[in-house]
């Protein structure tokens, strides 16, 4: 992506079932999350999250954002993912093996900046990630299977059944999920369930219908989970999606995943209102 906006931009980024690697080569991003000091970085790694983050930049930004399944992030960095959950770090601080051309993520980002086209940048990343993944720590096939089932059902599969299907005890599944996903299976299911709820609300479904479809006890349960994990109510979310601040009504919010409702554009000074979230239990 390359942005050249006339004014600074602030966005609320809701939890998603992915880790994020941002390779920046122009500008920087300031990321704030409740309970942690803000970080301003050119390149960013963010592990799996359970609460929203506020991202702000000057309006000028050039970067490639890579969304990784959590177990793929474990393979690439070889770091227990629970150590990175709800954290923002400079990816050069994490262990990784690229290849002899790149001493670290910073040099890789500079290499991307030097290429003349986005197609060339994507081709380079395909090559680097293929090599990097082959040299990394293999993920457990059972973790991948269990994660895929949770994603397929939007978090609806009960944890005991998930453990039984992959041949582990619940304790084994929880430990492996924390290591290779970053969240326990129950918390990961909450993130995926709320991800589905945001998608349905953004498509025009009512709160009552969304709560029923996604398996919440009732509308109040949906509202409580929404507030805890995004910092806003379902109603605030829906209004902000329809009429982003400073944009024409109905203009998209610039979501990070195709077909998902991941982001809200915020008016200047409103970031603090929406980012006062509680850590998911």
Image: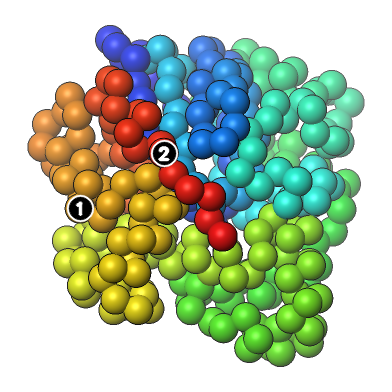
User: Which image quarter: residue 113?
Assistant: top right
Image vertical order of residue 107 relative to residue 170, above or below = above
**How many marks are shown on the rendered structure?**
2
What residue is rendered at 66% in x and 75% in y? 146
User: Could you say which is closer to the camera, residue 5 or residue 35?
Assistant: 35
Instruction: For label 1, count other residues whose C-alpha is less than 10 Å away and answer few (under 14), some (14-19) or many (20+).
Output: some
Would residue 107 appear left or right of 150 to someone viewing this image?
right
Residue 120 in view of the camera: no
Instruction: For label 2, count other residues whose C-alpha is less than 10 Å away and answer few (under 14), some (14-19) or many (20+).
Output: many
Q: Residue furthest left?
A: 249
User: Could you say which is closer to the camera, residue 56 or residue 219?
Assistant: 219
Residue 173's tag is none
What residue is rendered at 84% in x and 21% in y? 103
- Specify which label sits upstream in the sequence, 1 or 2: 1
Q: CA distance from mark 1 to mark 2?
A: 16 Å
Would residue 57 appear left or right of 211 to someone viewing this image?
right
What residue is rendered at 24% in x and 60% in y? 201
The residue indicated by pointer 2 is: 276
The residue indicated by pointer 1 is: 235
Residue 176 in view of the camera: yes
Q: Position of residue 72 (x, y in %)?
A: 71, 53
Image vertical order of residue 112 relative to residue 147, above or below = above
Helix, strand, or loop for circle 1? Answer: helix
Contact? badges 1 and 2 (CB < 8 Å): no
Would residue 89 appear left or right of 2 to someone viewing this image?
right
What residue is rendered at 36% in x and 61% in y? 224
Q: Position of residue 28 (x, y in %)?
A: 53, 16
Helix, strand, or loop for circle 2? Answer: loop
Image quadrant occupied by the N terminus: top left
């Amino acid at each position: 992506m390359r942005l050249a906006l006339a004014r600074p931009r602030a966005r609320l980024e809701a939890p998603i079932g992915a880790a994020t690697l941002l390779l920046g080569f122009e500008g920087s991003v300031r990321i704030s999350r409740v309970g942690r000091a803000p970080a301003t970085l050119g390149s960013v790694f963010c592990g799996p999250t359970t609460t929203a983050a506020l991202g702000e930049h000057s309006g000028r930004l050039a970067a490639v954002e890579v969304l990784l399944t959590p177990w793929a992030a474990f393979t690439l960095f070889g770091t227990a993912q629970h150590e990175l959950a709800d954290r923002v770090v400079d990816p050069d601080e994490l262990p990784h093996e690229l290849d002899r051309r790149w001493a670290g993520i910073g040099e890789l980002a500079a290499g991307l900046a030097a290429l003349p086209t986005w197609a060339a940048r994507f081709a380079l990343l395909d090559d680097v990630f293929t090599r990097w993944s082959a040299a990394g720590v293999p993920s457990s096939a059972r973790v991948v299977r269990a994660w895929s089932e949770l994603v397929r059902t939007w978090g609806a599969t009960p944890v005991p059944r998930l453990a039984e299907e992959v041949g582990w005890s619940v304790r084994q599944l929880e430990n492996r999920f924390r290591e290779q996903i970053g969240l326990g299976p129950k918390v990961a299911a909450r993130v995926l369930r709320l991800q589905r709820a945001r998608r349905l609300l953004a498509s025009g479904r009512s709160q009552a219908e969304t709560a029923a479809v996604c398996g919440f006890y009732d509308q109040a349960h949906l509202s409580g989970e929404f507030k805890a994990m995004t910092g806003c109510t379902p109603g605030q979310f829906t209004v902000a999606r329809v009429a982003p601040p400073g944009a024409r009504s109905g203009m998209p919010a610039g979501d990070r995943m195709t077909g998902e409702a991941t982001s809200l554009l915020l008016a200047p000074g409103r970031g603090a209102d929406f980012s006062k979230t509680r850590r998911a239990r």
